[in-house]
């Protein structure tokens, strides 16, 4: 079974900051990684799939990068609506695995 | 509007059963793999099961195998999750989600609002 480690688990940031979230996978998954944003009491929203492809409608301040075992979600010019929890997800094979989540909170 | 709407959650005693439903609208569900993802209170996301367009291919997470059955009725544009022998650690919000790619192992591009399942005596 693949292990996924997201870090940090908590980020305190201010409006306009750049935030980077890491997702490390226990084995090579090529580019089979997605990122989601979830706000309290709401369903997750897809941000990025295939490591770096933005879902339609997602602002360009979000970007994804990486390959194999190390992946990064970057949020440039953090906006108020970006304060949320972010999850990575591996879809290289079953079982589908989600990272533990990163909470981006207001500093 | 393209959406999926879950229903069927509730309070159930340990060992009991529940059947969750997911009704799709705005798209033809028979064209997509579909899945269920759950989230325990205060915890992260956990994939539960995926089902192929024709129901001929199904995958489950290990901890629900033998207790949970995913199924679909394309004529009703719906997907279901039958849960038996429920345990306290099955307590979660259960989300129905659409799989946009042709293979079953994929990301999820459309999520419902979730239905709450509480297993408690």
Image (cartoon, grey):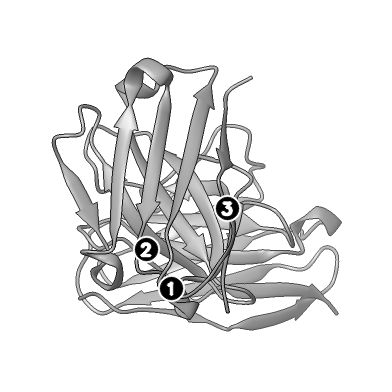
Query: Do discs 2 and 3 share a chain?
Result: no
Q: Measured from the top left, where is residue A36 in percent x and y?
A: 54, 55
Label 1 element class: strand
Name the residue at the left extreme.
B56
Figure check: A106 above or below A60? below
Chain for disc number 3: B
Q: State the residue position of label 2.
A: A66
Q: State the residue position of label 1.
A: A23
Q: State the residue position of label 3.
A: B9
| Quadrant in the picture for the C terminus of chain B | bottom right
Q: Residue at x 49, y 79 (%)?
A: B88
- How packed mark 2 is, by other alpha carbons closer than 10 Å (few <14, some 14-19, many 20 or more), is some
C-alpha distance separating marks 1 and 3 = 32 Å
C-alpha distance separating marks 1 and 2 = 9 Å
Label 3 element class: loop
The circle on residue B38 is none
Q: Are marks 1 and 3 in contact (CB under 8 Å)?
A: no
Figure check: A87 above or below A54? below
Chain for disc number 1: A
Q: Nearer the viewer, residue A102 or B34?
A: B34
Q: Are marks 2 and 3 in contact (CB under 8 Å)?
A: no
Q: Is residue B57 visible?
A: yes
């Amino acid at each position: 079974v693949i292990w996924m480690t997201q870090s940090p688990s908590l980020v305190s940031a201010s409006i306009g900051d750049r935030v980077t979230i890491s997702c490390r996978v226990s084995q090579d998954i090529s580019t089979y990684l997605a990122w989601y944003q979830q706000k309290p009491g709401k369903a997750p929203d897809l941000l990025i799939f295939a490591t770096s492809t933005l879902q339609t409608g997602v602002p360009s301040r979000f970007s994804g990068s990486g390959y194999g075992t190390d992946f990064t979600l970057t949020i440039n010019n953090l906006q108020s609506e970006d304060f949320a929890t972010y999850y990575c997800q591996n879809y290289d094979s079953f079982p589908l695995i989600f990272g533990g989540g990163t909470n981006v909170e207001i500093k | 509007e393209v959406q999926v709407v879950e229903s069927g959650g509730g309070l159930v005693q340990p060992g009991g059963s529940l059947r969750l439903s997911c009704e799709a609208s705005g798209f033809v569900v028979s064209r997509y793999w579909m899945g269920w993802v759950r989230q325990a209170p205060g915890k992260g996301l956990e994939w539960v099961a995926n089902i192929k367009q024709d129901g001929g291919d199904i995958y489950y997470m290990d901890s629900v195998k033998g207790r949970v059955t995913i199924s679909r009725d394309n004529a009703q544009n719906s997907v279901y999750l039958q849960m038996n022998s429920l345990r306290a650690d099955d307590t979660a919000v259960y989300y129905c989600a659409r799989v946009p790619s042709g293979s079953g192992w994929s990301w999820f591009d459309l999520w419902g609002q979730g239905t709450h399942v509480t297993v408690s005596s």
